[in-house]
Amino acid sequence: MKPAHLTFLSITLSASLVTMLSAPAQAQAQTAAAAPEASRIAGNFAITSNYVSRGFTQSWGKPAVQGGIDYAHASGLFLGTWASSISGTEFRGGSTEWDIYGGYSGTLADVGYTAGLYQYLYLGSSSPLVDGRKYNYTEVKLGVSKGPCPSTPSSR
């Protein structure tokens, strides 16, 4: 197990309750036959002019190549991975950010919930300011939703 000073853990817990629901949408949902959901795989690819995450440039103001793949099972289980080129100047010795994540989403009554674990890896990089420690960190994400608006915002 890594010492606590090597891993950053942030817990994002957010809740959103939306009180105004559309009556026509509720009526349609009640009358529609419940079709079984299928599992799905989705992918993404991008070339960006500058990779900025949480307000900080990850590519030192230069273009970045990014891509990922996600799997969502009908049961609510989800898994995915995403990667981007990063700056060796911003992340000494590094060239790639690799994110691995998974979790579960479901519904209880009319309230949706999500719980996930996200690992952010900065391959080959280490901090010159803190004895060569890695930039890698882990996040736990929890979310609750009701109505048409989810409460867990996308980090990308």
Image: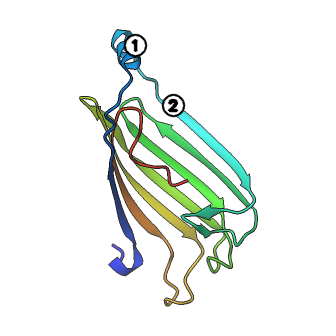
Can you see residue 61?
yes
Rendered location of residue 126, percent (x, y): 56, 81
- Are the residues at dot 2 and dot 1 in contact (C-beta closer than 8 Å)? no
Mark 2 to mark 1 CA distance (whole Å): 24 Å
Residue at the extreme front:
20
Rendered location of residue 114, percent (x, y): 34, 44
Residue 40 tag number:
2
- State which tag comes first along the sequence, 2 or 1: 1
Q: Residue at x 56, y 53 (%)?
A: 156
Closer to the camera in the image, 92 or 55: 55
Q: Is residue 147 above or below residue 94?
A: above
Closer to the camera in the image, 18 or 68: 18
Q: Secondary structure at mark 2?
A: strand
Q: Is residue 66 left or right of residue 55?
A: right
Q: Residue at x 50, y 90 (%)?
A: 131
Classed neighbour count for the residue bearing mark 2: other residues with Cα under 10 Å, few (<14), some (14–19), many (≥20): few
Q: Secondary structure at mark 1?
A: helix
Classed neighbour count for the residue bearing mark 1: other residues with Cα under 10 Å, few (<14), some (14–19), many (≥20): few
